[in-house]
Image (tube, helix red, strand yellow):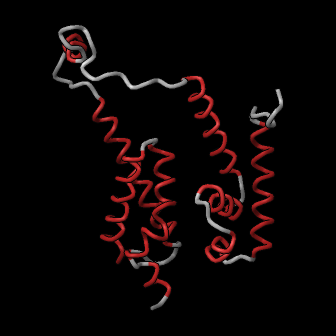
Amino acid sequence: MNALMSALDPHAWLADHGDYLFRVARRQLHSDELAEDAVQETLLAALAAQTRYAGDASPRTWLTGILKHKIIDAIRRQLRETEIPRDVDGEEAVDRLFQQDGHWVEPLLPWGNPQREAELSQLRRVLDDCAGRLKPVMAQVLSLREVAGMETGDICKELAITPTNCWVLLHRARLFMRQCLELNGFAKAGAA
């Protein structure tokens, strides 16, 4: 079985890439259930489109590209489901949110810590911006190691690089990310 055919083995997709795809989806959708659905939809779409896969990118990259579209679809569905019906005026829409006794029809979700959420959101934006400034191969190595949790040997196979090159790229990427975060207002750990 050639490399392209083994890459298109649907039985291996979940085992080889499922955890990575779930982490990517979970990071964007902030829900285990929505992330699981997005991964499942991704695998079904990949199965339907596997004859169009030319092998130009790795299977993981191909599946991640499909997943990105499924994540966007999930976010759009969420937005549509939370819209107030257009056939109802504002007062009626508000009345539908409450029971006769004045309690919410659906209890409010806990707000958590809005300040912490804002800080995390800002950190995510800065991390994405900093990662976008990395050389592509450094970004790939850093993402495969820190986001996907891959081992060095697997990263080397995926990118066709030596372990020494992998560690140098990873070291430089981490140094750059640290400097970029510090320049964007995220102080060193322990600094006040």
Is 1 above or below relative to 135?
below
Image location of residue 126, percent across then percent down:
66, 39
Residue at x-position 28% and y-position 28%: 83
**Residue that extends furthest to the top in the rendered view of this protein:** 101
Q: Quadrant of residue 142?
A: bottom right
Compare residues 92 and 192 and report the one nearer the observer: 192
Residue at x-position 46% and y-position 23%: 111
Is 102 above or below relative to 7?
above
Residue at x-position 16% and y-position 22%: 87
**Residue that extends furthest to the right in the rendered view of this protein:** 191
Q: Is residue 121 left or right of residue 85?
A: right
Image location of residue 173, percent across then percent down:
75, 56
Q: How many marks?
A: 0
Image location of residue 125, percent across then percent down:
61, 39
Residue at x-position 41% and y-position 78%: 8
Compare residues 53 and 187 and report the one nearer the observer: 187
Q: Quadrant of residue 94?
A: top left
